[in-house]
């Protein structure tokens, strides 16, 4: 995903977050029945709507790695 595509994606996603009714209507119409259980169905629907190629690896989020990265920034506490 290019920088311009990422910016368009994030702007549209933010717009959907700001207007929940718009988001419900969008996802009800755009998420396909076979994608309902797919964890990235919403991101895929946004990409398809904007004409951006959907690559799952661009939307994955490793929670454990993020937690370890965050924990590394905490100061050491001596008791």
Image (cartoon, rainbow, N blue to C red):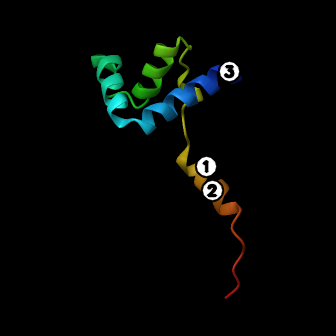
Mark 3: few/some/many CA within 10 Å (<14, 14-19, 20+): few
Give whichever of 19, 54 is nearer the camera.
19
Image quadrant containing the N terminus: top right
Residue designated by label 3: 4
Q: Position of residue 33 (x, y in %)?
A: 27, 18
Q: Secondary structure at mark 1?
A: helix
Q: Is residue 74 left or right of residue 8?
A: right
Q: Is residue 1 visible?
A: no
Q: Earlier in the sequence, mark 3 or mark 1?
A: 3
Q: Residue at x 56, y 13 (%)?
A: 53
Q: Position of residue 21 (x, y in %)?
A: 32, 33
Name the residue tied to disc 2. Answer: 68
According to the image, label 1 marks what residue? 65
Asked whether the residues under the numbered discs 3 and 1 touch, taking CB atoms below 8 Å apart as contact, a structural biologist would say no
Question: Circle 3 sits in a helix, a strand or a loop, which is it?
Answer: helix
Task: Find the distance from the CA under tag 3 to the CA under tag 1.
Answer: 27 Å
With 73 as the anchor, is 10 left or right in this view?
left
Whether the residues at callouts 3 and 2 have beta carbons within 8 Å, the answer is no
Relative side of 33 to 50, left or right: left
Q: Residue at left 63%, top 56%? A: 68
Q: Residues within 10 Å of mark 2 (few under 14, many from 20)?
A: few
Q: Quadrant of residue 6?
A: top right
Q: Is residue 53 above or below residue 24?
A: above
| Image location of residue 2, percent across then percent down | 69, 20
Quadrant for the C terminus, please.
bottom right
């Amino acid at each position: 995903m290019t920088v311009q595509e990422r910016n368009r994606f994030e702007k549209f996603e933010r717009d959907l977050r700001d207007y929940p009714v718009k988001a419900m209507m969008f996802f009800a119409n755009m998420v396909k029945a076979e994608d309902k259980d797919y964890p990235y169905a919403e991101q895929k629907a946004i990409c398809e709507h904007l004409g951006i190629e959907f690559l799952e690896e661009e939307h994955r989020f490793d929670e454990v790695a993020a937690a370890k990265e965050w924990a590394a920034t905490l100061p050491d506490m001596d008791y």
